[in-house]
Amino acid sequence: MNHFPLALIITSSIGISSAKAMASDDVIEPILQRISTSENSKDNDFYMSKYEVTVAQFSQFVKDTGYQVPKNCMAFTDKRWPDPDNPGSWDLPEYIANPYRPVVCTGIRGALDYANWLAEKTGKSYKLPTISQWRYAAMAGKTGRMAFADDLKQQEVCKYENTEDIANIAGFKKHHQVRYKRSANCNDGAVYHTVVGMYRPNQFGLYDMMGNVREFTRSCHEYSDSKQQVCQQYIVAGEAWHWQPRGVNVLDWIDKDFQGSLEGIRLVLETDDPGRVSEATMRFARQLKEAQLAQRQHHLQLQKIPATPIAIKVQLGENKSLKVSWLEVKGEAIKYAVYRAMSDSANGHATGFTLLCDNLKSPQYIDSSVPDGAYVRYQVFSYNEQGEGLGSQIVSYGMAKIFKEDERIETEHFFDGQYYWLGKRDSATVAGFSANPDHFPTGIKPHKPAWVQLGFSVKQSKTAMLSFRAQAEQDTRFELWQGNHLVGRYDIPKSDKFATYTASAVLVAGNVPLEIRLDESSWFELDWLEFK
């Protein structure tokens, strides 16, 4: 990555002196875009910053005032994972190395104080936007989820925004050994927040409205019970590099004392006349273009992360081995990694996906380590020097165990499912069911129920007593289905440890798979269930 020394911006280029207060003409103001409101809007016309406030701009405020930003930020970098016991600050070396990235870790207080300082310095009434102003500007006269497209398949967003995408997933795997299973189906070339204005603007000429960093507003979500004038939670708008966009109108908020590295600042100016543009602002605009050009080269490198392997298949080979193959992924120095999940009912052993083989250069792998009668699933990843792409479709081989109505059903021996995980709890292997598979932040999440299916055989229809061992994050409920027949709905109270619960169940005769389905907004884990 190309780095731009902060001193170059705040001394040589702008001419700030530590011995003398900054003159108003030395202040880098927002580069403004006029937002003309419609007749139906409750807002008057206003100006909004084309870009999120950068490190260079916020640094002027800190240097001019000696402002102390609390150093308790939940900071994300290539070397840091958010940790309250090891907090960061807005001026971490990783954050200020490139002063054209948006400033983060200021908290809402720092954002409000910066806006007040800028207003005092320039004589212009700069403010954080209201949520109404922000949404109107973000939608740019359109309807739907986002101004550029609804993009329900998450394939176009990378042209317009820095979002949770293939580059982000690859970066987390490379830097933190953490891999999320899903992301936008595109590559924007950035892992964390990047230089402002790198993507297409919306139809109002505003950049990064639904990506890069979330943005503070001055609209209050919740006031103090004792003092109605004290805001406890402020509304934040947009999305960040760490999440996929949910849409402009999704409501989200943040505590007044919280500091994170996913939130940034954008300002508005409520006036008919924005006044003259300072020399420092014009110089900043020219330097920003140079920074964007340099950053684009870095983005192009990350966009070389290889494509997802396709046409994966598994077939019986020689000596009972299994041959896993796929189409070759095009690109330079491509390698492959094969992961395997296995259910061996003969010894009751089951595993989630674990690395089977790495550093493969040809698009096939011979697996000679599968026990007789085991049910196995495979997934393949391609990678290169830049990182690892998204995983292939999952393929399976063998017959999953078919449980009878009178035996204990260990849920880890399922044969199909979505939005699940396997884990070890109290020496037992359990299946977990996710209420947020796409890793969305707080607020409204798309409803995507998690489920698994197990082989199941019932000789005759009957009412039985169901027992199951589970734990839940919050009070929740799951369903049991045999095809289109609802066996029952079952509540799990909130608990931090596993417990056994009982309830009645209505079974129907047949060899129809048993589906365990989470249909609530909180996750739970299930060890086993049995019918008596």
Image (cartoon, grey):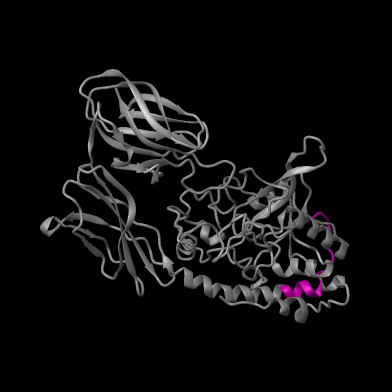
Q: Quick one: 198 or 101, which is closer to the camera?
A: 101
Q: Residue at x 29, y 33 (%)?
A: 409
Q: Quick one: 48 or 58, which is closer to the camera?
A: 58
Residue placed farthest to the bottom in the image?
12
Q: On the rendered structure, is 392 left or right of 273? A: left
Q: Specify the quadrant that holds the N terminus.
A: bottom right
Q: How many marks?
A: 0
Q: Specify the quadrant that holds the C terminus.
A: top left
Residue placed farthest to the left in the image?
319
Q: Is residue 490 magenta?
A: no
On the question of residue 47 being in view, the answer is no
Q: Is residue 432 above or below residue 77?
A: above
Q: Position of residue 365 (x, y in %)?
A: 23, 63
Residue 225's quadrant in the figure? top right
Residue 291's quadrant in the figure? bottom right
Q: On the rendered structure, is 10 left or right of 102? A: right
Q: Quick one: 448 or 64, which is closer to the camera?
A: 64
Residue placed farthest to the front in the image?
426
Q: Residue at x 45, y 54 (%)?
A: 180
Q: Position of residue 353 (x, y in %)?
A: 34, 53
Magenta residues span 269-284
On the question of residue 242 being in view, the answer is yes
Q: Is residue 177 above or below residue 361?
A: above
Q: Position of residue 74 (x, y in %)?
A: 63, 56
Q: Position of residue 471 (x, y in %)?
A: 45, 35
Q: Residue at x 30, y 30 (%)?
A: 483
Q: On the rendered structure, is 254 left or right of 112? A: left
